Image: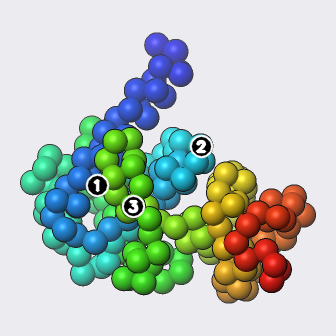
Amino acid sequence: MPRTDVLGEELQRQREVLKRVGATLKAAEIPFALAGGYAVWTRGGPESTHDVDFVLPQDCVEEAVEKLVENGMDPVAAPEDWLVKVGRDTVIVDLIHRLPTGPVDEELLVRCTELPVDSVTMPVMSATDLIISRMLALSEHACDLSPILGSARALREQVDWRLVRQEAKRSPFALSALGLLDALDIMEGSGIGDDDA
């Protein structure tokens, strides 16, 4: 089978699981939002080829896993202390309760936007929070700038760059990414927050 067919089938499985998780959390009235690559995709970026990410407050994680398991998902062991994982078939879903910016809280969720995600409407992380989270996740051992460049190009007009600049001061790696975005004129004339740059 050609690689494109295999990739297409995997992406379709990811979308189906994404919708299942979103619909389950929504029906259970658990506060959450779509995050990561699929949030970028929903907002106009390239489709994620990795796992599916959601954010939710830590005190909601146990109930979320319980509801998802009731709805056909399997718990998956995760060594990290900032997320839990569930899966179905070959698709892994990260339920993240702490981002590089801090714990997932009501303030972050209020900034989310209800958007249709492949026929299911659900909260999606703001473009600004997505960019900040990606930049602050950079470290000496994880310094791939390509996801940030792709996200920033696709979402540039939705991002509050003034806030991104402010938050980038928390990390020398984020400042380096910001310098690259500046050098490539990705932020120039891109909308919100430009006048204070």
Outermost residue to the top: 1
Give the camera-side residue of 119 and 145: 119
For marks 1 and 3, give the CA distance.
Answer: 12 Å
Q: Secondary structure at mark 1?
A: helix
Identify whether 4 is placed above or below 14: above
The amino acid pointed to by label 3 is Glu
Residue pictured at 65% horizontal, 57% vertical: 155
Q: Can residue 67 be seen in the rendering of this structure?
A: yes
Give the camera-side residue of 41 and 144: 41
**In this figure, which residue is indicated by the disc labeled 3?**
114
- Within 10 Å of disc 2 (Cα), the crowding (few <14, some 14-19, many 20+) is some
The answer to which of marks 1 and 3 sits earlier in the sequence is: 1
Residue pictured at 47% horizontal, 19% vertical: 5
**In this figure, which residue is indicated by the disc labeled 1?**
22
Q: Secondary structure at mark 2?
A: loop
For marks 2 and 3, give the CA distance.
Answer: 19 Å
Does residue 26 appear to the left or right of 172 in the view shown?
Answer: left
The amino acid pointed to by label 1 is Gly
- Residue 170 placed where, x, y %? 68, 86
Outermost residue to the right: 183
Identify whether 192 is placed above or below 1: below
- Residue 118 placed where, x, y %? 38, 41
Asked if the residues shown at circle 1 and circle 3 are in contact, with their CB atoms under 8 angstroms apart, the answer is: no
**In this figure, which residue is indicated by the disc labeled 2?**
46
- Residue 115 placed where, x, y %? 42, 55
Which of discs 1 and 3 lies nearer the camera? The answer is 3
Which of discs 2 and 3 lies nearer the camera? The answer is 3
The answer to which of marks 1 and 2 sits earlier in the sequence is: 1
Asked if the residues shown at circle 1 and circle 2 are in contact, with their CB atoms under 8 angstroms apart, the answer is: no
The amino acid pointed to by label 2 is Pro
- Within 10 Å of disc 3 (Cα), the crowding (few <14, some 14-19, many 20+) is some
Identify whether 105 is placed above or below 52: below
